[in-house]
Image (tube, rainbow, N blue to C red):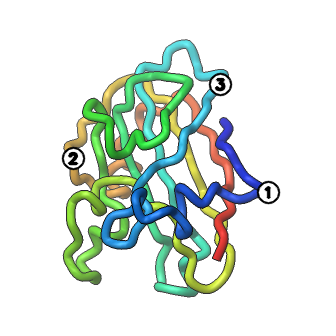
């Protein structure tokens, strides 16, 4: 699995320093492209998660930036997939938390890029190769995805992505 980096960091376009044209409610919403390789032959669909575990000291829990499943199998997830795709099933990120002010669905059920407030953060991107569609609807939570993954994962891979404070 590969993503483009600049000097080891996620490019500004996909994070806190995104141009205003790539944001919504001051949050970066253009998802980065992902290149995949060596998927098992039996792979029918993909799922992915993007989680910031460095957020725990800041807000008390890992911050979920993106969760999506039932992506038709591909070796290239294009830029802005989160906003343009109509086939996959979108889960709620941390903006869907009942502990926060209600947020627009354009934020809650889509990619929201890194905006680390205190220091550079490491983000864990995990892609799962699935043998079937998962029985989930738009608006599911990460724990629901994890339950469904138990029976249907052929393989998975994770990478760490660094984003600037």
Residue 135, label in figure: none
Q: Quarter-wise, where is residue 85 in the image?
A: top left
Whole-Å distance between the Cαs marked 3 and 2?
Answer: 27 Å
Whole-Å distance between the Cαs marked 1 and 3?
Answer: 23 Å
Q: Is residue 130 above or below residue 12?
A: above
Give the structural element (helix, strand or loop) at label 1: loop
Labels 1, 3: front one: 1
Q: How many labels, in total?
A: 3
Q: Of 25 and 54, which appears nearest the observer?
A: 25
Whole-Å distance between the Cαs marked 1 and 2?
Answer: 35 Å
Q: Earlier in the sequence, mark 1 or mark 2?
A: 1
Q: Residue at label 1?
A: 7
Q: Is residue 29 above or below residue 95?
A: above
Q: Earlier in the sequence, mark 3 or mark 2?
A: 3
Q: Residue at x 54, y 56 (%)?
A: 13
Residue situated furthest right in the rendering: 7
Give the structural element (helix, strand or loop) at label 3: loop
Labels 1, 2: front one: 1
Residue 138, label in figure: 2
145 sits left or right of 102 in the view: right
Q: Residue at label 3?
A: 37
Give the structural element (helix, strand or loop) at label 2: loop
Q: Residue at x 71, y 59 (%)?
A: 9
């Amino acid at each position: 699995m590969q993503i483009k980096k600049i000097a080891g960091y996620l490019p500004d376009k996909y994070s806190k320093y995104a141009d205003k044209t790539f944001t919504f409610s001051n949050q970066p919403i253009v998802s980065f492209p992902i290149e995949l390789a060596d998927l098992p032959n039996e792979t029918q669909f993909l799922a992915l998660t993007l989680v910031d575990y460095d957020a725990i000291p800041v807000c008390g829990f890992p911050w979920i930036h993106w969760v999506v499943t039932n992506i038709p199998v591909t070796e290239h997830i294009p830029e802005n997939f989160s906003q343009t795709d109509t086939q996959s099933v979108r889960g709620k990120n941390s903006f869907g938390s009942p502990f926060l002010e209600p947020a627009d669905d354009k934020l809650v059920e889509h990619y929201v890029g890194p905006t680390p407030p205190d220091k550079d953060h490491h983000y864990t991107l995990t892609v799962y190769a699935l043998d079937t569609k998962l029985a989930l609807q738009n608006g599911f939570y990460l724990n629901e995805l994890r339950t469904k993954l138990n029976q249907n994962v052929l393989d998975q891979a994770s990478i760490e992505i660094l984003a600037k404070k």
